[in-house]
Image (spheres, rainbow, N blue to C red):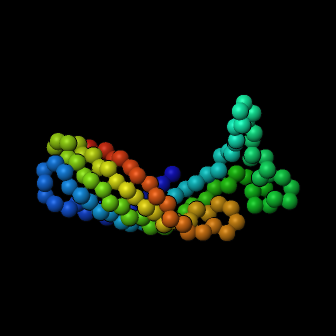
Amino acid sequence: MMFQMGYQRIFGDDDKINFFAEGGLHVTLAKFDHNVILINDLLIDLTSYYYQPGYNAYAVQKPIGFGFGAFAGIGVNLNMNSKFRVQFLYNPTYEGINIGPDPKLKLQHSIGLRFYYNL
């Protein structure tokens, strides 16, 4: 699950298409559910390796962690009509997800498509 809180600025005053930039704080909740590999028709569950004695990092429960960081973004805003807006965007985030030993802040990249309904 991802939560972003920030500011977005739309540049230009065209009725149909404009560019925008955004930035703010980023929070991610990541939950380890399972880890499998499929080789031909053989399905191997790698989750069992996390629960072996001597591997203390994930001995009690499936790992879950919050990641905090910042995000930025650039994109194109398309006003379809008075009620609908579509945005295409590139959104880099700099965050660390606290799962496993020694989590580090890293740069993540995503592209997206947003649909807005104007009330």
Residue at 55% across, 56% down: 29
| Res. 55 image quadrant | bottom right
x, y percent for residue 66: 57, 61
x, y percent for residue 34: 68, 44
Residue at 84% across, 52% down: 52
The quadrant the C terminus occupies is: top left
Left or right position of 117 against 48? left
- Number of disc labels: 0
Residue at 17% across, 42% down: 81
Q: Residue furthest right?
A: 53
Residue at 68% across, 55% down: 63
Rendered position, 53 above or below 104: above
x, y percent for residue 33: 65, 46
Could one spot residue 55 in this view of the protein? yes
Given residues 71 and 63, the one toward you in this image is 71
Rendered position, 52 above or below 5: above
x, y percent for residue 5: 39, 62
Q: Residue furthest front?
A: 40
Left or right position of 49 against 68? right
| Res. 44 image quadrant | top right
Left or right position of 29 against 15? right
Given residues 52 and 91, the one toward you in this image is 91
| Res. 91 image quadrant | bottom left
Could one spot residue 27 in this view of the protein? no
